[in-house]
Image (cartoon, rainbow, N blue to C red):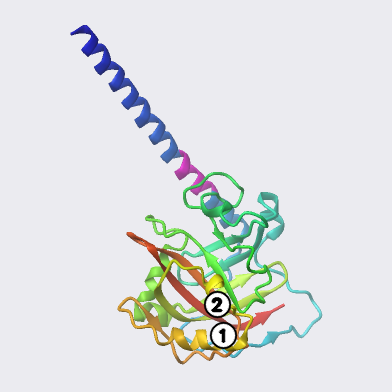
Amino acid sequence: MRNKKRIWLIVCVIALLGAAVCGGILIGQKLKGQELESLYESVSETTPTVSTSAAIPALESTEESTDAPYVSPIDFDALHETSEDIYAWIEIPGTNINYPIVQDPDDNTFYLRRSPDGEDFTGGSIFTENYNSTDFTDPNTIIYGHCMRDGTMFAELHNFADADFISQYHEVIIYTPNQELHYDVFAAYPYSDQHLLFLYDFTDKKVFQSYLEGIFDVRDMHSQLRPEVALDADSKIITLSTCMQNDNTRRFLVQAVLTEQKS
């Protein structure tokens, strides 16, 4: 009888220790998220947001009337103190998507479960793989982010499945130390977990043109398309990719085309 009580006591102690460890991890992750949020707020300046319901102009390179160099509203010097892998910043006005973009030069999975400073973090980072360049000159740049249950990271991408939402919040802005890139969202839809850069040679203009045309053939109740957005084989697009809730075999993609470049 005493042995049974002793075993039961040991089991209870182990259970309590396990609960304490799990609780500590959850608290640590929450504190890490708050720390990152404070960092992001400190290095990004709030700039007036242009109404995204207005038409976005055709692609053009904007030059100021003076010779003053472009000054990014993002403090990349401060970000580089956190990590040299931070090379850009993505913002979707009207949403909470407002994060640095990272790329590890060697390990494409490094930032899946790590914050931009390289520490363990379940929310991971917004990142690209080294199959893409970091200057956004590739025909299709794939940007990844987790769909977090608390609505952070790329969770709000799923809102683009709503017609009213995509018609209002279709501008994406990417900042780098030397330029500001404006994109117009033209498609949002579920897709398989197949790697787009392995499936298609986007450097082949015929392949790229065929791929773009195929997007507008998508028929899914959770998809939204904006065929009025101009696209051709010379376009530069970004594909924002996040997971589908409760389905690890599929992704939700939001795609946008470059329309304006300031440098």
Q: In the drawing, does residue 128 fall left or right of residue 16?
A: right
The quadrant holding residue 141 is bottom right
Query: Which label belongs to residue 200?
Result: 2
Locate the N terminus by quadrant: top left
Residue projecting furthest to the top: 2
Q: Residue at x 56, y 72 (%)?
A: 197
> Which x, y percent locates residue 224?
38, 81
Q: Secondary structure at mark 2?
A: loop
> Which x, y percent locates residue 114?
55, 49
Query: Which label belongs to residue 207?
Result: 1
The quadrant holding residue 243 is bottom left
> Which residues, given as a range, are shown in magenta?
28-35
> Which x, y percent locates residue 167?
41, 83
Q: In the drawing, does residue 194 fall left or right of residue 47?
A: left
Of residues 228 and 194, the one drawn nearer to the viewer in this rendering: 194
Q: Residue at x 26, y 12 (%)?
A: 6
Q: Does the image show residue 48?
A: no
Q: In the drawing, does residue 17 fall left or right of residue 199?
A: left
Q: Amino acid at mark 1?
A: Val
Q: Does the image show residue 42?
A: yes
> Which x, y percent locates residue 64?
74, 83
